[in-house]
Amino acid sequence: MPLEIIRNDITKVRADAIVNAANSSLLGGGGVDGAIHRAAGPELLEECRTLGGCETGQAKITRGYKLPAKYVIHTVGPVWRGGKYNEAKLLADCYRNSLALAMEYKLESIAFPLISTGAYGYPRDEALKIAISAIGDFLLENDMTVYLVVYDKASFVLSEKLFSSIAQYIDDQYIDEHPEYIRSRRLEAFQAEEDSFLYKESVAAPVPEEKRRRSLDDVVNNLDETFSQMLLRLIDEKGMTDAETYRKANIDRRLFSKIRNDINYKPSKTTAIAFAIALELNLDETRDLLLKAGYALSRSNRFDIIIQYFIENRNYNIFEINEALFAFDQPLLI
């Protein structure tokens, strides 16, 4: 799970490092900064006194002391002044430089708050977009588990335009599947399958009765390609590397290795969809890949409808999709 959005108190997150949205003095303050200093104990302030402050967009590292995290990476976000003073670049630099420092120290996991959205007044939807973009770009090239920590739902704001668009799409597509409707759909599907079978039988050359009877061994030995086989074939057809695929899918490389090495591996539905997103499959191709793993997209499931929304709009950024899923209280693609 390279990037995960979680609700938690960042001072309680167990990661190699947590990021402190600090002020330029690095001597503590309010909000996240004050909470981290209180949880870490006075030794953190003593070490910070030796650092000589920090410029906006830059990052410095200290020990974590009494925190569950081994390290604290301190970064100074920009004060929002209307967006005309390079705030977006400075905010992105906070994430980039913090991640670079984590790489330098060979850390495997790091947890970020939503930087600059407290007293510094950065609009939350814009700050979230920058955070997701900067972290996503980093994870396409590097292996690390990154947590984006929000304290409560009110701290997380998806773009109003995007939220409204997805909400309208859900309203248009959602079907409350009553038992009668489900039975009707199953009957239609069965009839379509039977008609297809009868058509194929009518145009095929006659086959002797003894050859039409297939043994169980024959059936089992002639199964269609598995999920793993189809996935690997699609990766080759798209001209992608394994690393490019699992990173774009937000999938841990160890999980990908299991799928590659086990022809009969059965993934979770979210994993299968994540690969469909990484491969930029259209809706029909996505349904085919899901079917190999025993899943389908349903119009009575909000998670499925949101996935369909992004595929139809050809937005295959898995981190932006996870933003939307989180905002609508749905499972993430991890």
Image (cartoon, helix red, strand yellow):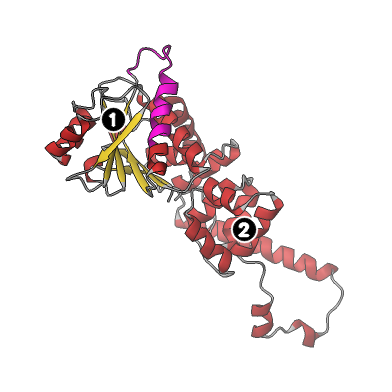
Viewed as shown, does residue 310 lie left or right of 31? right
Q: Is residue 225 visible?
A: yes
Q: Tell me the kind of residue under disc 1.
A: Ala
The x, y position of residue 275, in whole percent, is 56, 52
Q: Position of residue 255 (x, y in %)?
A: 48, 60
Quadrant for residue 119, please give it. top left
Looking at the picture, how far across and down is residue 192, in whole percent? 67, 60
Distance between the Cα atoms at labels 2 and 1? 41 Å
Magenta stretch contains residue 124: no
Specify which label sits upstream in the sequence, 2 or 1.
1
Report the residue at 43% width, 33% height from top.
Answer: 96
Magenta-drawn stretch contains 92: yes
- Counting every numbered tag in the picture gives 2
What range of the chain is rendered magenta?
Answer: 79-98
Residue lying at the far bottom in this picture: please name it: 210
Mark 2 or 1, which is nearer the eye?
A: 1
* Horizontal relation, residue 94 to residue 239: left or right: left
Where residue 250 appears, as percent x and y from the top left, is 49, 48
Q: Which secondary structure dominates the residues rendered in magenta?
A: helix
319 or 329: nearer the viewer:
319
* Left or right for 52, reference 1: left
What secondary structure is marked by label 1? Answer: strand
Q: Which residue is mark 1?
A: 21
Residue under pointer 2? 231
Pick the front one: 52 or 36:
52
Within 10 Å of disc 2 (Cα), the crowding (few <14, some 14-19, many 20+) is: many
Disc 2 element:
helix
- Choose top left, top right, bottom left or bottom right for residue 309: top right
Identify which residue is drawn at 43% across, 28% down.
92
Of the pair 62 and 224, the residue shown nearer to us? 62
- The three-letter code of the residue at mark 2 reads Leu
